[in-house]
Amino acid sequence: MSRLKEAMGAVAAEINAALDGYIPRSQDSDGRLFDAMRYSTLAGGKRLRPFLVLQSAALFDVPPDWVMPCAAAIEMIHTYSLVHDDLPAMDNDDLRRGLPTCHKKFDDATAILAGDTLLTLAFELVTAPDGHPDAAVRAELTHQLAAAAGGGGMAGGQMMDLAAEDSTLDLADVTRLQRRKTGALFHFSCTAGAILAKRGGAERAALGRYAEAIGLAFQIADDLLDVEGSEAELGKAVQKDAAAGKATFVDLLGLEGARSRAAQLVDDAVAALEPFGGKADLLSDVARYIVARKN
Ligand code: GRG
């Protein structure tokens, strides 16, 4: 087994146990809300964003207890985005992570509430005093997480994406949109370790450059998988972008152009990690994996 596969498997087990503990159960009439949150969050997924949080923190030897709330929080926000994105009012998908989407398994109202509650629970976790002992660090994490998920980040990027249906975006437009829609959560995940370790300046900036490169590489790979992948491997519908008339990196660069841009971004990501030496080997492996993955 490759060292990355082994490390990602170990993190997935840890993060699953943490998420299981953080998301409550209820026997009351609100039980359906928590069932839906648990259904979507514990349904699998690569746990890439928590892995990045944990690896960026490992660069600075941050104690795991300080990191886990933040790693779980980013996965909750990612899951909320998938639950809402799958709703009929947005992408209207029936399949996610190989299972019926949240609104198909439950209903639209429950899926909306489950997404809302995952988002707010994430902030409950990063602000809780039993996470990082320094309140200023918790405040900075909260500020950065809100910026990544909000109007200037993922939610704003999603709005741009919805507005882009049947429009003609150029490469700069699509890059700007994707930097926000998918890139912002990657940026938070990769820089969280530096925030938790109270390291600013060059180290945080280097992780920011790494995040920028892997965020775009991830989206290019996603666009390639949308064209070349299968529903069985991906656990979700494919060829949705063309059907929605959305400009993708593949449309704008062609298949070969998209592959070579992704390869260039992997090189940029690995180069950004140079200041961390061998300690960042797994983060370099993640950059390569992001473009080679099949799901
Ligand atoms: C609803 C506010 C709001 C935002 C939605 C990110 C997003 C914005 C929607 C997701 C739509 C989508 C499939 C985008 C492509 C990139 C992406 C986020 C893919 C899924 O991420 P993975 O591959 O998924 O990390 P797993 O299931 O492995 O966690």
Image: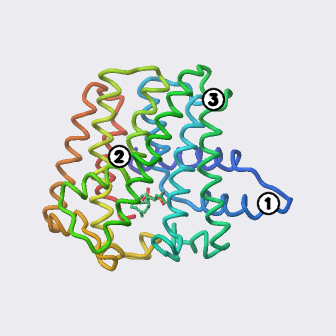
Q: Amino acid at mark 1?
A: Asp
On residue 30, the disc is: 1
Along the horizontal axis of the image, is 200 left or right of 8? left
Mark 3 — residue? 131
What amino acid is at disc 2? Answer: Val
Where is ligand 1, by quadrant?
bottom left
Q: Which mark is residue 145?
A: none
Report the residue at 29% width, 30% height from top.
206
| Residue denoted by label 2 | 286
Q: Image check: 208 left or right of 87?
A: left
Task: Kindly report the distance in space between the C-alpha atoms of the residues bearing marks 3 and 1.
Answer: 27 Å
Which of the two marks, 2 or 1, is nearer to us in this view? 1
Pick the quarter of the image with the C terminus.
bottom left
Which percent across, then down, holds residue 277? 29, 27
Is disc 2 surrounded by few (<14), some (14 to 19) or many (20+) residues within 10 Å? many
- Compared with 133, 75 (above or below) is below
Q: Measure the alpha-carbon separation of dots 2 and 3.
A: 26 Å
Residue visible at 66% across and 69% down? 109
Going 50% across and 28% down the picture, which residue do you hit? 140
Looking at the image, which residue is at 66% across and 58% down?
A: 37
Q: Position of residue 115 (x, y in %)?
A: 60, 58
Q: CA distance from mark 2 to mark 1?
A: 39 Å
Q: Nearer the viewer, residue 176 or 3?
A: 176
Could you tell which of marks 3 and 1 lies nearer the N-terminus? 1
Residue at the limit of the structure toward the bottom, as seen here = 243
Q: Secondary structure at mark 2?
A: helix
